[in-house]
Image (cartoon, rainbow, N blue to C red):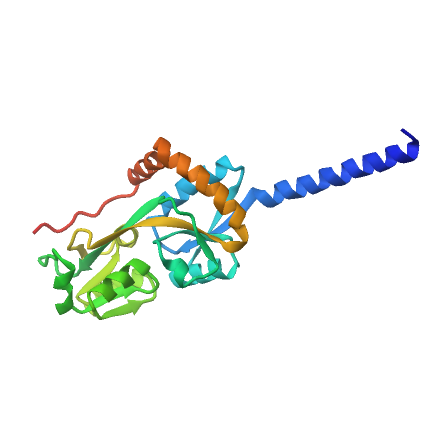
Amino acid sequence: MSKHSLKIYFLLVSVLFHVNTLSAAEKETLVLSRAQGAEIQLISEAVLAAAYGKLGINILITPLPNSRSLIAADGGQVDGDVSRIAGIESKFHHLIRIPVAINAVKVAAFSHVQSVSINSPKELARFKLVCSRGVKLVELLVEAENLNCHEANNFEQALKFLQLKRADMALLPVENAVKVIRENSMEGVFQVSESLIERELFHYLHERHRKLASQLELVLREMENTGEIKEIQQSCCNVIPDLPVVPN
């Protein structure tokens, strides 16, 4: 091989190494949004960290206001949303749902009146209700039962409405509400129902990651089949405290 050919060879090797290094760097980290104060998402994040790790990818989480988290993911400002209920892709058309459930969320009623007890969503109509803006599962419940529900900006504001007795009940995801109550040492707020509605949660990626979505589905499906997802969920659940439900 001539000296000129050797120079070209080493130049090509150098360029290919540089390109491969850049590709590896590009694959290192994905930025995912999620709702602020959403304690339930800790489980989803743990499952995703394990799944993406198997693909050699790290994830960074950006907490945003509930609705803005979806808008950022759909608009491509971030790479995806940590987890949401099925069906949001019908409104947020640039998001791809990975069809393997990684978590579940349940909504319960909270009140400033400890003696009240809610056994069915049908019983909610006679109360003045408050919700947190952007919680799709609560929106489903409100629509299904034809309820009127004032929208607070976040979970903490919704619970403060109860403390101030500006509402009779708050409809909130259980884990998220419990976190706010405990962190703020809120007094006079009680969980007064079991789960009123529950749905599985799925990870969503922006459509530019369509190829990655297929790869991730295979990894999550394998984790589901081996029981790894369930193990992670159970491990995380052990560190998320429960709030006792007011007995009937």
Q: Position of residue 35 (x, y in %)?
A: 39, 56
Is 126 above or below relative to 209?
below
Which of these two is toward me, 28 or 190? 28
Dividing the picture into quadrants, the one containing residue 24 is top right
Q: Which residue is at 19% across, 55% downward?
A: 196
Looking at the image, how many numbered discs can be counted on the residues? 0
Dividing the picture into quadrants, the one containing residue 11 is top right
Q: Position of residue 120 (x, y in %)?
A: 13, 57
Q: Is residue 65 at all visible to an observer of this figure?
A: no
Q: Is residue 6 at all visible to an observer of this figure?
A: yes
Dividing the picture into quadrants, the one containing residue 108 is bottom left
Q: Which residue is at 41% across, 54% downward?
A: 34
Q: Which residue is at 26% across, 70% downward?
A: 150
- In the rendered structure, the answer to whether residue 169 lies left or right of residue 101 reads left
The single residue placed furthest to the top in the displayed view is 1
Which of these two is toward me, 50 or 176? 50
